[in-house]
Image: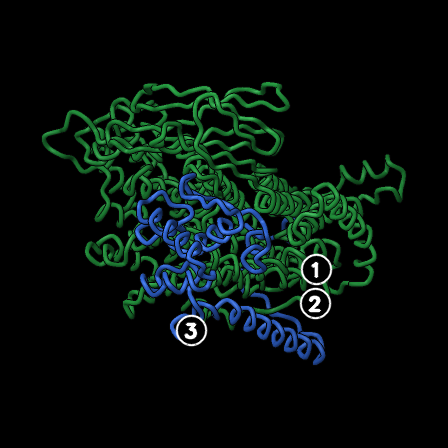
Amino acid sequence: MKRIAALFLTVFWLALPAAVHAVEPDEMLKDPKLEHRAREISEGLRCLVCQNQSIDDSNAELAKDLRVLVRDRLKAGDSNEEVIDYLVNRYGEFVLLKPRFGGHTLILWLTAPAVLVLGIVAVFFAWRRQRSAAAAGPRGPVELTDAERAELEKVLKDRKGG
Amino acid sequence: MIAELGHYALVLAFALSLIQSVLPIWGSQRGDPRLMAVASPAAAAQFLFVGLAFAALTQAFVQSDFSLELVWANSHSTQPLIYKFTSVWGNHEGSMLLWALILAFFGALVAAFGHNMPATLKANVLAVQGWIAAAFLLFILTTSNPFARIFPAPMEGQDLNPILQDIGLAVHPPLLYLGYVGFSIAFAFAAASLIEGRIDAAWARWVRPWVLIAWIFLTLGIAMGSYWAYYELGWGGWWFWDPVENASFMPWLTGSALLHSAIVMEKRDALKVWTILLAILTFSLSLLGTFLVRSGVLTSVHSFASDPTRGVFILLILATFIGGAFALFAWRAPSLRRGGLFAPISREGALVFNNLFLTAACAAVLIGTLYPLALEATTGEKISVGAPFFNMTFGPLILPALIVMPFGPFLAWKRGDILAVAQRLAVVLGLVILTALITAWAMDGGPLLAILGIALAAWMMIGAIADIASRIKLFRVPAGNSLRRAVGLPRSAWGTAFAHFGVGVTVLGIVTTSAWQLENIRVMKEGETATIGGYEATFLGSEGRAGPNYREIAARFRIARDGRELGVMTPSKRVYTARGMPTSEAAIRSIGFSQIYLAIGDEMNAGGVAVRLYWKPLVLLVWLGCVVMAFGGLLSLSDRRLRVGAPTRARRTVAAAE
């Protein structure tokens, strides 16, 4: 529910201003287009020494170095993918906040969709069983448990008494 | 001396929890009312003694008794009184004690207000509560004793972590724990009914108020935590998909699903097995959250392995309760009576849809939180799962539930007419399109998806209003009649409308801040002016100041619009003397529901200071929406049916239905 729009952002790469940052004024590139790309890339890269922060959010020294590195690569003419590949080669996949789809992340990527699909299948079968049970005719009277019987007695007695 | 008494009270509470765990359930199995009657006084006494222990610890903190290791490590004599007080739970041991206190509190509440319930159910519920309490009290006593002394007693303490020295610490953890731990009641109810092997619609009516209470507090707790992170962490984000946040968000998701499925169970006697499963699942996720946050496993899998006592203990608690509950479920659930027939297009169907997507969305959060830990533990491979992953997987799974939400209240129970509902919602759709067009016009087009986001928010908000309008037959009968109908409407109907409206409000805030936030990051020298969103901020200069336990450099900015002064904002950089730790205190000014967010960075070499200016349009709606949701929950809770209806109705159900 939270950050729906941020989701749109990541899925469709629309030209929205980015959310949060610790980028410093002296690091920023003169060319706003290039700077915008740098921000986009930075948001998906983990500050390796922090807990769950992108290099765009972090004040750590290393994050600053990485931000500068990203901008250097962009100035050298790399595409976004090339910059990201360069960093993954250097630091491993750990640097990506969104792991790549592959053998080692199959479970990660497929669990939630699988839960949904299994859920839909389960609901379908439950509904069908319920319908066929209904078609077979109304349920017979259900036996009361001893406790219920006692409760019933009591209530009826109360009614008579009151 | 008082600390020792507190420690002793904690031991007594543990002993009481053992009694509460054993005698009542023994009684309910043997049909012995005297044994069952032990449950209530034991629960009340347990609460009393945990309360005494908590009071003893609080006293030590407030009086800065540094002979207690915990006080020494987390407090300082110069701290303002409020932070001395909140330091009690600003650490591992104290927060576990708060956890146990709230658990005991809920147990005592059931003991005090559960007199409508059948005696066996009450005894079993309190017994299950007793098991949980015993496990956690034993955990505190053996691995996290808050009353440990040090000798010789130091003269001065090490201060509370400066980030925690905030009013947020006074409010956020208690609210969050009231939510988290509140779900233990739903769990206890589920386990008790499985033990008895019997469950009916009345069960849902007894358990629903507890679920509602827990959900209200969790909603507020998460919102409060989010706002705290927003203003304290200094860069203006309000949700980071941090594992700690996820830990609280997961029980919220399944708790919301539980809230809805319990309605189906109560009204239609359907979804019983599923509701039980959700109750177990929700508290299991609360326990998982406690494990994630308290074991240190998040900081590093390795640090967890090197000092495993606490982590392994909580893991054992986790495995015992979750494993035990699921085993009980697998054993007993097939024998539960099923009932309540409904067509796919019906109120029940809509609620099943809601449950399906909420659960799948929760699965996305769960796997994203746990997978990196599991992968590292098994293969040693390290990956990161952060915001981009969650936005991509969680978003599409929650979106359908949000889109379908307004349909739910319009659909009839058992068999709904989707065309008739679509007709009634056509007016809403018209208004939504109008809203989207006006927004697009006002924002000069704006990104298409932001406009769609606005439309989604409007759809939910106007849909909620239309629900009420249709119930009171607004514009179709004279206004006086409508008013009378509005007054006569059940509180729970108002609750639904408010809660759904609140979701729309939150989404609106999310969309506007994400899409139209403005930023201006630059170096400013004295006398310079920067603009943000039509406001001018002039840097007046900075000055050193001394607080009770910190020093700070505060920068003053004059905020004006079209030359008219609105006030002065003073963001600062602080250094807390005891720990030498720097923090950044942002300055925030609300204008309507929007905010100017101003933070300063380091002094620059060339003179001047790095300044971050943000314009956050309608950002307050993000949290205000949560407050509206919680208010909706409160209205539902005050519904007559849940207050006085329960005993008479319940008896009637037993007498008439079965």
Give the residue type at disc 3. Gly
* Chain name for mark 2: B
In this orientation, does residue B220 appear?
Answer: yes
Image check: A64 left or right of B474? left
Residue closest to the eye, B97 or B371: B371
Q: Which residue is mark 1?
A: B347
- The location of residue B284, given as percent across then percent down, is 42, 58
Report the quarter where the N terminus of chain B lies: top left
Q: Is residue B385 above or below residue B206?
A: below
Q: Secondary structure at mark 2?
A: loop
Q: Nearer the viewer, mark 3 or mark 1?
A: 3
Q: Is residue A20 above or below residue B583?
A: below
The colour chain A appears in is: blue
The colour chain B appears in is: green
Give the residue type at disc 2. Phe
For residue B612, which numbered disc appears in the image? Answer: none
Determine the CA span between mark 3 and mark 1. Answer: 40 Å
Q: Which residue is mark 3?
A: A102
Determine the CA span between mark 1 and mark 2. Answer: 9 Å
Q: Which residue is mark 2?
A: B342
The residue lying at 46 percent from left, 35 percent from top is B522
Q: Residues within 10 Å of mark 3 (few under 14, many from 20)?
A: few
* Chain name for mark 1: B
Residue at far front of view: A76
Residue closest to the eye, B220 or B196: B220
Marks 1 and 2 belong to one chain = yes
Give the residue type at disc 1. Arg
- The location of residue A123, given as percent across then percent down, is 60, 71
Q: Do callouts 1 and 2 mark residues in contact (Cβ within 8 Å)?
A: yes
* Chain name for mark 3: A
Q: Is residue B447 above or below residue B227?
A: below
